[in-house]
Image: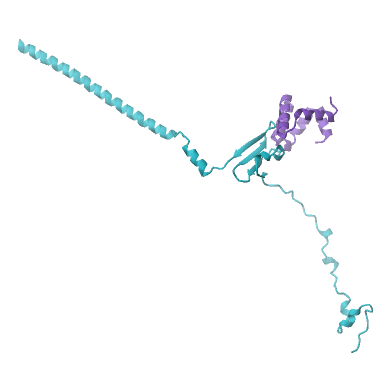
Chain colours: A cyan, B purple
Amino acid sequence: MAQYPNYYPNNNMQQMYMGYTPMTTVQQYPQYPQQAIPQQSQFQPQQTIPQQIIGLNGRYVDDFNTLSANDVPMDGNGAIFIKKDKSEIQLKNWTANGTIATTCFKPITEQNFENNINMPQINLNGLYEDMRALRGEIAERFDRLEKSMTNSTNHTTNSMAKTSVSKIKKETEAE
Amino acid sequence: MNMMQLLNALQNPQQFAQQMMNNSQVMQNPMAKNAIQMLQKGDSQGIENMARNLCKEKGIDPDEMMKQFKQQLNIR
């Protein structure tokens, strides 16, 4: 077997590749033209738009007693703290006189709703209707009373007239 | 606000209050707005009450804080 000339005297790999043509190995990694290489200097810096944080201040807490005044932001916006068991929500914010105002929100459960039903509540519309009915009844009774009094007065007058007439008749008869 | 600004504010509180009134960011804060209004009116008692409330909420002794403040400014 004819041996190829040793173009790479230090490269023993040449002998392993018998059909190896040295011309193809000059540039194993073709270089890209320089224009195609993306250069960062050609890029224009992107304008960073300041991101506005849209949301609420606050966090979930195990116990509201763990909160301190530093947890409430002093920028005028309040902070919402939610208990992890969802039993209560507290809204805290600094007031104008330097104190922290706390507003508590509690969910309305079925048990609480039943308790509210048993509480005495004033039904104004029903009360007004009752008053109208009572007024009508009182007026009706007054009318009846007035009629009865009128009748009794007439009866008394008539009876007195009859007795007087009968007396006169008797007197005339007696004469 | 650095110490120099604070010193300038103490020297001329009216001017300081006017500068703060022109700052929209400050005027959006109800506590700051109330403090500046009291400063303009000269309501020192109101400002002191506000400071005491703040210290109470933060768990700070207001008298001790005032003492340290005076020490920093070398005021007797």
Residue beneath the point at 24% across and 22% down: A150
Foreground: A49 or A110? A110
Q: Is residue B71 above or below residue A38?
A: above
Residue A103 x, y percent position in the rendering: 62, 37
Q: Quadrant of the C terminus of chain B?
A: top right
Task: Answer with the quarter of the image where residue B27 lies.
Answer: top right
Q: Is residue A21 left or right of residue A111?
A: right
Residue B49 x, y percent position in the rendering: 71, 27
Foreground: A36 or B4? B4
Q: Is residue A82 above or below residue A163?
A: below
Residue B42 visible? The answer is no
Residue A147 x, y percent position in the rendering: 25, 24
Q: Is residue A82 left or right of residue A130?
A: right
Residue beneath the point at 74% across and 25% down: B44
Residue beneath the point at 69% across and 34% down: B30
Residue B22 x, y percent position in the rendering: 75, 34
Count how many numbered circles sit on residues in the image: 0
Task: Answer with the quarter of the image where residue B41 lies.
Answer: top right
Question: Which residue is most to the right?
Answer: A9
Residue A69 visible? The answer is yes
Q: Quadrant of the N terminus of chain B?
A: top right
Task: Answer with the quarter of the image where residue A144 lies.
Answer: top left
Residue beneath the point at 61% across and 38% down: A104
Question: Which residue is most to the top?
Answer: A175
Foreground: A62 or B39? A62
